[in-house]
Image (spheres, helix red, strand yellow):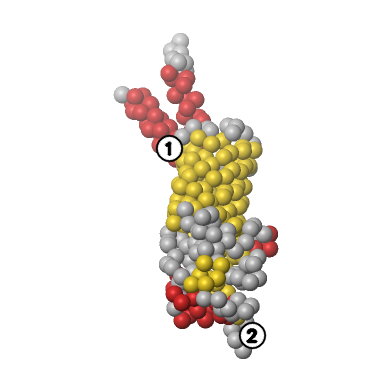
Amino acid sequence: MTLRLFYLLLLFLSITSNLKAQWSVAMGPGIASYSGDVSIPDVSYLRAAGSLEIWYEFTPKLYAKVGASMYRLYAEDFNPNRNRDFRADNYEVYTGVVYALTAQRKITPFISAGIGLTKVDPEHNVALDGINGDAWLRSREWLLDGHPVPTPVVIFPIGGGFRFRISSTISIIADGALRFTNSDMLDGVSASVINANQLNDIARLYYETIRPNGIDNEVFINGNPKIGDVYGIFSVKLQFELGSPSFVRRSRSFSTRRARGKVECPVIIPDSN
């Protein structure tokens, strides 16, 4: 009876330790980049980001993950006649799958894909008349593009990276992913034309300030609503595996030996005296 309880205890510890070892937590800093109506990707426009992820291992090659990131987007308008520089402090949540191209190696390349949501809250730069400096106007509040800014919007992260194992429980993950969106308003610039007569007073004053010749026409060219905005995040994260892999290996080995009938028991030799 005691031996059976001992076996059951070992089996329970093996199962619970195995479940723990399948979970891991990864976190770390990164950089964010953007491409859209205002600008194409530019190294000088890279801004800070930070990510937190929880991974679950189905097999040595297949994982699921959920994560959240905070990031800033920034770009200066490539069109000096439009002059719609912007920045945005956003956050995102997402889930997806990770497929390792090799299993349980020191360096493991992988690819990933998923779906999520991101906040959209662009701000646009405007110089302050008679004052050294400038201000940032929230597009969501002042409707600078002539219509509301939708938020949150759907994102489709697609990317890949490498996992570098530095111990049995700690790894470094270096990865990047593009976020394709169903929105053209990450930068607050979308409408093909702006009709000044339909703007509120603040928005009209904004365009009069940023455009070199002011509002010389009541209707002027703005953006391209047919192409959605894209942003990407590259990060370096420290990953911690939960549970004790060494105990899991010992438990699996014990279970295997027992299943094969090779559990060795002590032999008692009777006293000859």
Query: At which x and y percent is residue 44?
Result: 68, 63
Above/below status of 177 relative to 211: above
| Mark number displayed over residue 57 | none
User: In this orientation, which residue lies closer to the viewer: 1 or 156?
Assistant: 156
Q: Which residue is under mark 2? A: 132
The answer to whether residue 4 is visible is: yes
What element does badge 1 sit on? helix
Q: Nearer the viewer, residue 241 or 95?
A: 95
Residue that appears at 60% across and 49% down:
176
Residue 257: x and y, percent? 47, 20
Q: Are marks 2 and 1 in contact (CB under 8 Å)?
A: no
State whether residue 132 is above or below residue 262.
below
Q: Which residue is mark 1?
A: 19
Which residue is nearer to you in this view: 215 or 251? Answer: 215
**On the picture, is 133 further left or further right than 179?**
right
User: Which one is nearer the viewer's eye here, 140 or 14?
Assistant: 140
Query: Callout 2 environment at 10 Å: few (<14), some (14 to 19), or many (20+)?
Result: few
Q: Quadrant of residue 15?
A: top left
- How far apart marks 2 and 1 lie (CA) works out to 59 Å
Task: Please identify the quadrant where the N terminus is shown.
Answer: top left
Q: As shown in the figure, which amino acid type bears the numbered disc 1?
A: Leu
Most extreme residue toward the bottom is 130
Q: Is residue 247 above or below residue 52?
A: above
The location of residue 5, given as percent across then percent down, is 34, 28
SS of the residue under disc 2? loop
Quadrant of res 107 = top right
Query: Which is nearer the N-term, disc 2 or disc 1?
Result: 1
Left or right of 102? Residue 142 is left
Residue 236 image position (x, y, % from top left): 61, 51
